[in-house]
Structures are given as structure tokens and as C-alpha cells.
Image: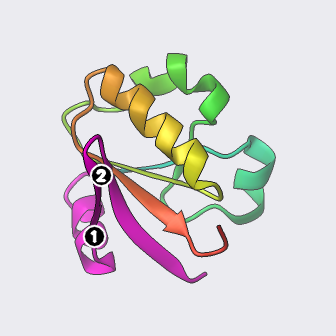
């Protein structure tokens, strides 16, 4: 899978290298897939947790607010909505792993 990585920030977008993403995950970062359970079962990234966008408003409690969150899915818009939701819940280090198929 060819992936492009970038952060989602309220003020705009900024690049994040694959090596940096690996380091963030190795340091306790959380990889969160916001797709449906069926899509997640088909081709989940190793180590990803499935928290579908429609359930994230209640299931965000399963995430550590003090740790980095890297969101992934097949639609940038869904990840952007998830990032806004998490930011509103007090998460401050939110990144987006964008699929090049978008």
C-alpha cells in the first residue's frame, strides 16, 4: 500500500515522514482505523485499533489522551472529522495517515 502521511492541525497541514510515524508508534502512539468493521477486517494495518467514525464520539474513551493518535482510513474527510472530534475531547497530538487511493 502506497501511503502518504500528514498531520491534521486546526491551522493547516504539515508533513510527517514514515520514519517519524514509526517512531511515534514505537514510543506508545496509537494507530486508530476509523473505517467500518468490515473494511477493517479486510485490510487492517498491523497494530491498528478499529474505532469506526460513527462510534468514536463514545469510544474515544478507549484511547490515551496523553499519547499520540494516528488516524487512518480510506477517506481523508472521515479522518478529518475524527481529528476534530478528538481535538474537541482534549486530544492534542493527532496525526493522519492518508491512503494514496483517496
The residue singled out by tag 2 in the image is 12
Query: What number of labels is visible?
Result: 2
Span shown in magenta: 1-29
Can you tell which quarter of the image residue 101 is in?
A: bottom right
Question: Considering depth in this image, is 96 or 65 the residue closer to the camera?
Answer: 96
Asked whether 97 falls inside the magenta stretch, the response is no
Quadrant where the image shows the C terminus? bottom right
Can you tell which quarter of the image residue 74 is in?
A: bottom right
The residue shown at (50%, 64%) is: 98
- Residue at the farthest bottom position: 2
Q: Can residue 46 be seen in this view?
A: no
The residue singled out by tag 1 in the image is 16
The residue shown at (38%, 29%) is: 86
58 on left or right of 54: left
Badge 2 marks a residue whose secondary structure is strand
Vertical position of residue 98 compared to residue 18: above or below = above
Front tag of 2 and 1 = 2
The residue shown at (56%, 65%) is: 45
The residue shown at (40%, 69%) is: 5
Vertical position of residue 18 compared to residue 24: above or below = below
Across and down, in percent, residue 61 comes to: 41, 21
Residue 93, numbered label: none
Across and down, in percent, residue 31 comes to: 43, 52
Mark 2, Cα crowd under 10 Å, few <14 / some 14-19 / many 20+, is: few
Across and down, in percent, residue 70 comes to: 38, 52
Can you tell which quarter of the image residue 84 is in?
A: top left
Amino acid at each position: 500500500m502506497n501511503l502518504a502521511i500528514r498531520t491534521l492541525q486546526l491551522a493547516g497541514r504539515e508533513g510527517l515522514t514514515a520514519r517519524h510515524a514509526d517512531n511515534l508508534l514505537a514510543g506508545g502512539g496509537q494507530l486508530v482505523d476509523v473505517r467500518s468493521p468490515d473494511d477493517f477486517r479486510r485490510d487492517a494495518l498491523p497494530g491498528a485499533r478499529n474505532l469506526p467514525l460513527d462510534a468514536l464520539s463514545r469510544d474515544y474513551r478507549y484511547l490515551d489522551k496523553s499519547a499520540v493518535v494516528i488516524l487512518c482510513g480510506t477517506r481523508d474527510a472521515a479522518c478529518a472529522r475524527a481529528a476534530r472530534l478528538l481535538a474537541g475531547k482534549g486530544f492534542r497530538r493527532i496525526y493522519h495517515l492518508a491512503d494514496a487511493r483517496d
